[in-house]
Image (cartoon, helix red, strand yellow):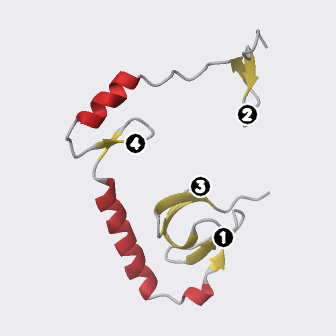
Amino acid sequence: MLKNRPKRVECLTCHSQHAYRAKEPKNPSKAQSAKGSSSSTKEGKSGKKQGNTKSSQNKAEKLYTELLAEKDLSSATPYCMSDSYKIDEIINHKNFGLGIIIDLIPPKKMSVLFKDGYKYLVCGVSE
């Protein structure tokens, strides 16, 4: 610690150490000018411009409804990171609810469509 600020920090993932870097405060003048523009694109939390997110969310929700309409929801598998899954399998996530597996991403990820949209989850991880 140097006065009231940390001087060095340790990464909780890889345990490497580096100098503390505080995040830059957001410039209020830039935020004000972005609010005044009438563009159809929006800036997300990442700062990247995004297209019409409502439209893409509605498309995802519509696809979700269509895909689950033809499935037996009572056979949903509870999600567990260590389990392996197949495309089109229904899972039940404790936070996101029912989802359908859209794609398997090697080596240990999968794309799942939930009512709120697409999420990437870990799968097949041995503990």
Q: Position of residue 56 (x, y in %)?
A: 32, 60
- In whole angstroms, how far apart are the C-alphas of marks 3 and 4? 29 Å
Q: Position of residue 99 (x, y in %)?
A: 53, 72
- In whole angstroms, how far apart are the C-alphas of marks 4 and 2? 28 Å
For marks 2 and 3, the one nearer the N-term is 2
For marks 1 and 2, the one nearer the N-term is 2
For marks 1 and 4, the one nearer the N-term is 4
Q: Where is residue 108 in the image (x, y as percent from the top left)?
A: 61, 57
| Circle 2: element type | loop
Instruction: Please state which of the two labelled residues, at mark 1 or mark 4, is closer to the viewer.
Output: 4
Q: Is residue 61 depicted above or below 109 in this figure?
A: below
In the rendering, which numbered label is found on residue 44?
4
Identify the residue position indicated by label 3 in the image: 107
Identify the residue position indicated by label 2 in the image: 14
| Circle 4: element type | loop
Instruction: Please state which of the two labelled residues, at mark 1 or mark 3, is closer to the viewer.
Output: 1
Q: What residue type is labelled 2?
A: Cys
Q: Is residue 114 depicted above or below 19 in this figure?
A: below
Identify the residue position indicated by label 1 in the image: 79
Instruction: Please state which of the two labelled residues, at mark 3 or mark 4, is closer to the viewer.
Output: 4
For marks 3 and 4, the one nearer the N-term is 4
- In whole angstroms, how far apart are the C-alphas of marks 1 and 3? 18 Å
For marks 4 and 2, the one nearer the N-term is 2
Residue at point 40%, 79% (across, down): 65
Q: Residues within 10 Å of mark 3 (few under 14, many from 20)?
A: few
If the image is split into quadrants, where does the C terminus sit? Answer: bottom right
CB of mark 1 within 8 Å of CB of mark 3? no
